[in-house]
Image: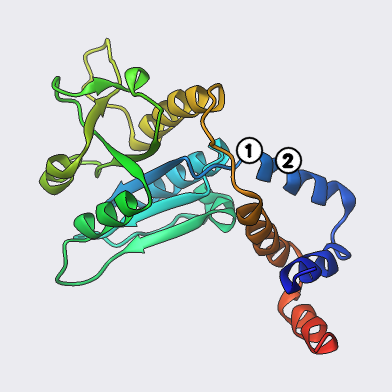
Amino acid sequence: MTTREALTRHLGQYITEHKKAFIERVLNHRTRYVTLVLEDIFQSQNASATVRTAECMGLQDIHIIEHENKYGTNKRVLKGSNKWIDMHRYKMKGFNNTEICFRKLRESGYKILVTDPSPDGIPIDEVPIDTKLALVMGNELHGASDTALQLADEKVFIPMYGFTESFNISVSAAICLNVLLTKVRNSSAAWALTPEEKEAIQLQWYRKVVRRSDLIEQEFLRSIK
């Protein structure tokens, strides 16, 4: 048994069986096959609602690009959803953080889909799901940046039939993610987390659930040296 496995088992003693079963069910639906990228969102309630949507949909990772606008949160909107996902932030001054984020995603095997209402894109329901997908949402006023559009593998849009040009960003994310994840989960794609990923995230979540888990962990690690 590894130290991580032993520590997870030890912390599990402080968690009810019902809670552990709930965590296991959530882990079984978690995915890194689809991820979400938020580029320069400036309204905290929009960013928070989108993060909450992504967590409810089963995403494990969200990538936050910051240029002009710093990522902010609204706790009442988040409702603790940010505790259960991995947030990757790109905010280096003097660098093009969109380029940095996209390069990292491509190195991890993602195809980059940038949402844009222009007619030269493809409808979200026609996106192939034969590879990992990173869905990029631009900011509330101007949409995706020129850099994001130039570097995109595909531009995608949600078919609309009314007078209004766009949805709220959290609504757009919900529609796009629901379409993509439904297709992915009904396919033969290897969308689930690996056993190693599940093990690492399970410990991460146990630490959040158990009160004073840091002190319990320190005492346990001392006892097994």
Under tag 1, what secondary structure? helix
Identify the residue at horizontal 54%, vertical 36% (top origin): 190
The location of residue 69, given as percent across then percent down, is: 24, 59
Identify the residue at horizontal 88%, vertical 55% (top origin): 16
Seen as rendered, the residue at the extreme top is 161
Viewer-proximal residue, 171 or 109?
Answer: 109
User: Within 10 angstroms of label 1, few (less than 14), some, or many (20 or more) residues?
Assistant: some
The location of residue 146, given as percent across then percent down, is: 10, 44
- Amino acid at dot 2: Arg
Vertically, is 75 above or below 183?
A: below
Circles 1 and 2: CB atoms closer than 8 Å:
yes
Identify the residue at horizontal 21%, vertical 14% (top origin): 163
Which quarter of the picture shows residue 207? bottom right
The quarter of the picture where the N terminus appears is: bottom right
Numbered label attached to residue 25? 2
- Amino acid at dot 1: His
The quarter of the picture where the C terminus appears is: bottom right
Under tag 2, what secondary structure? helix
- Say whether residue 120 is left or right of residue 182: left
Identify the residue at horizontal 77%, vertical 44% (top origin): 22
Instruction: Quickly name the residue at label 1.
Output: 29
Vertically, is 13 above or below 184?
A: below
